[in-house]
Image (cartoon, grey):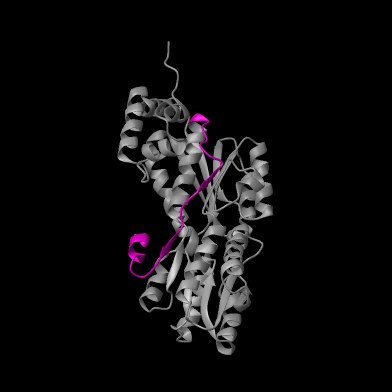
Amino acid sequence: MKNKKVTIKEIAQNTGVSLGTVHRVIYGKEGVGEETRQRVLAEIERTNYQINTVAASMNRKPMVIVVVLPKCEGDERFFFRGIWKGVKEAAEKLKEYKVEFRYIESEYGLSKISLALQELFDSDLREVGGIVTVVDDDETGMWVRRFQKQGIMVVAVSSYSEKHGCLCSLRIKHEIAGALAAEFLDLVCEKKDGKIIVLTGNKGIYSNRNYAEGFLEYEKKHGDSRRLLLVEGFGSNEIADPCRKLLQEESIAGIFSCTARNTYSICKVLEEMNRTDVCLIGTDVFYELEEYFQKGIIKASIYQSTVEQGREAVEVLYRYLASSELEEKNIYLPVGIVMKNNYSFYIS
């Protein structure tokens, strides 16, 4: 008689830890005490969990996972470069498990990723087991529900799965990230008079809206919301001129940008105007920011764990397709503040 297949849930129950802890031990992640790690590893060895997983993969057809994300060019490169890096790191580790990856690097960009999903939906889906994508608006959510009806599971990065029925979503808590940025900016600007420009991004995108609302809510409760100047828009074409005008006509103490593309755009504006006196708090960590950290144009940036989002999205989807196990519906990753002296650690 064959031994009953052991699940991650059973390992968690047998060792008295959470599913997330077992997952971190299996994939060698940080955040687990050494005594707990050894206890979980002993149970994994006792139950032969990993060997069973590999054996199962050798006896089935190749699993097909499709990744649909914006192409890393233009303004999309700042955020999605990290996501793609994490996706491909995870894919490399899964080679021995007979997983085939198909990459769709969409030309449409974040705001129109639904068009790429529509094209995929209209193609031959018979071999597709699951999809990793970004779901940040209602139109994209509609296509997610259509895939689900076809039995194709969708895991979303930087998204809100509870709105559209994704299998799982991975993201930071944008409201907390916004509040963190506001708290940090208030500390830096505590003794400075002047107004704060808030680059809110695109209100039609959930993550932008919730990120900005977190910042504004903190200021309403703990700061002075009367000194906030809101600038809506996405990218240099939409925010550069309004910001130049405000910087010329108002006394500006600080700026917060809740998107990567706006962070890069406002860095260029501040450099052009030689305004290193303004405290800029940006979003995301990418190579193009290095010179602006060195020049003192950007003082800090909120790290959104983009590489980790991409990597864990693939791992979560694979585990579900291989064993029908799902640890959590929503997985929240940590946020951090990056400054000139620790920038190199995050970018590596």
Does residue 340 appear in this view? Answer: yes
Front in this rendered view, residue 40 or 146:
40
Residue 258 in picture, x, y percent from top left: 54, 66
Figure quadrant of the C terminus:
bottom left
Location of residue 158 in the rendering, given as x and y in whole percent from the top left corner: 54, 53
Q: Residue at x 59, y 86 (%)?
A: 245
Q: Is residue 64 left or right of residue 41?
A: right
Q: Position of residue 311 (x, y in %)?
A: 44, 47
Give the residue furthest to the bottom. 249
Q: Is residue 107 magenta?
A: no
| The N terminus: image quadrant | top left
Residue located 42% across and 38% down the image:
21
Instruction: Indicate the position of residue 342 as horizontal and vertical percent values.
Output: 34, 65
Residue 73 visible in the snapshot: no
Q: Is residue 332 magenta?
A: yes
**Outermost top residue:** 1
Above or below, 217 relative to 85: below
Q: Quadrant of residue 226?
A: bottom right
Stretch of the chain drawn in magenta: 323-348
Q: Residue at x 50, y 63 (%)?
A: 180
- Residue 187 position (above or below residue 253): above
Residue closer to the observer: 8 or 90: 8
- Foreground pick, 107 / 297: 297
Residue 226 drawn above or below residue 151: below
Q: Nearer the viewer, residue 93 or 277?
A: 277
